[in-house]
Image (cartoon, rainbow, N blue to C red):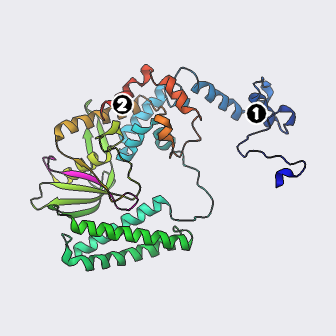
Amino acid sequence: TLERLPHLKRVSLSQLGPEKTAEALTENQFALAALRDGRRVPASLYNSRLRRSLEAYRCRWSRNFTPHDGFIHSPELLASISQWADQQFFSPSRLEIFATCPYRFFLLKLLRLQAVQDPETIQKISPLDKGGLVHKILDAFMRGAREKGWFPLAVQHAAWLHRLLDEVAQEAFGEAEERGATGYQLLWELDSEQILADLHTFVQKEIERTDAVVPDRFEVDFGAAGSTPFQLTLPDGSCLSLTGRIDRVDIDRARSAIRVVDYKTGMYRLNEQAIFEGGRKLQLPLYLMAAAELYGLSSLEESVAEYYFVSSLGKFHVHPFTGENWEQKEKQLAQILQIITTAMRRGRFPARPGPGKQNCKWCDYRLVCDKAVDRIHSFKVHSPELEFLGLLEDYP
């Protein structure tokens, strides 16, 4: 092997510089090596990047909350953030991100940092593109079935419904291929076969459903420009503007109860016992409220919103949020949203890695945080500065 050749040494790609100052080739490498050895670095070698990095490190490992922890103290910046929050249309998913990790929300929405894109050739369709493709196919399928008068979906129309699905799916597959989003042909053939097989299973399950509701509207926008506005008044009297897109709304014959459907293509990982999960499950209740306002419903007791996992990966699981005991749920939801928006206006955006750093696993900003973010969080979490945000856990 190469390691047996003379004068060759294996060096980790993650190594930022030489291990010893004697091996340094540049001033930057000398400074990094000196820091690694715990030696004092001459002031002349401190460039602006190194100085900022060391300052961030010291601040994060201090007992105080600083801007490097996502805490804003400047009155001018706080006023700007408050004004920004008043003018924003928040999607439920963005509010869920805040409840999961305010620092991630801060980097995404306020600093608008974009994840670094991998320049390598696309090998297979991405989960994001796959999700968009499935949503497009289901939207076209449902609209086509309605135009042909096949609602409610029934056994006597089964053959035609499956044929319709094949037609709209092949058209959508072709468009995805033209965009270059499908990757290598062989892998795409396997992926497209699985997607189509899953969708046929979904259609069959829809045919077999015996609910007293039928699909009524698809891809329903609310809160965005040109769509139905949707605002909630919070306990302190402030207003929260919301925006989103509902995949499907079903309604009963009396038009007195609805079912909001949100399609999911990933793996089922939801906590079935949790209702709001400390603000990390807001999409279904907020979508249900938006749809109820759209239909002019005075009560949500008989209505429901659900995640519908439309793939074998998600085992076609249906995860509901019901309108039962709506008065109590609505009050709890308002309190959760109050905590989130108040924390924003106070400039509180701390990192919340979660048990075992579970919140960091799929985060695009993992490299921004300290590798030991969980340790830092553990000795700052009991600070009075975080008591207000900690109230979110009172709403499981």
Q: What secondary structure do most residues of the magenta stretch adopt?
A: loop
Q: Which mark is in front, 1 or 2?
A: 1
- Does the magenta portion include 245? no
Residue displayed at 54% across by 65% down = 124
The quadrant of the rendering that contains the C terminus is: top left
Secondary structure at badge 1 equals helix
- Does the magenta portion include 298? yes
Identify the residue under disc 1: 32
Residue 205 is situated, as x and y percent measured from the top left of the image, at 26, 66
Secondary structure at badge 2 equals helix
Residue displayed at 31% across by 66% down = 202
Disc 1 residue type? Leu
Label 1 CA crowd tier, 10 Å (few <14, some 14–19, many 20+): many
Extent of the magenta region: 297-314
The quadrant of the rendering that contains the N terminus is: bottom right
Disc 2 residue type? Thr
Identify the residue under disc 2: 342
Residue displayed at 61% across by 29% down = 56
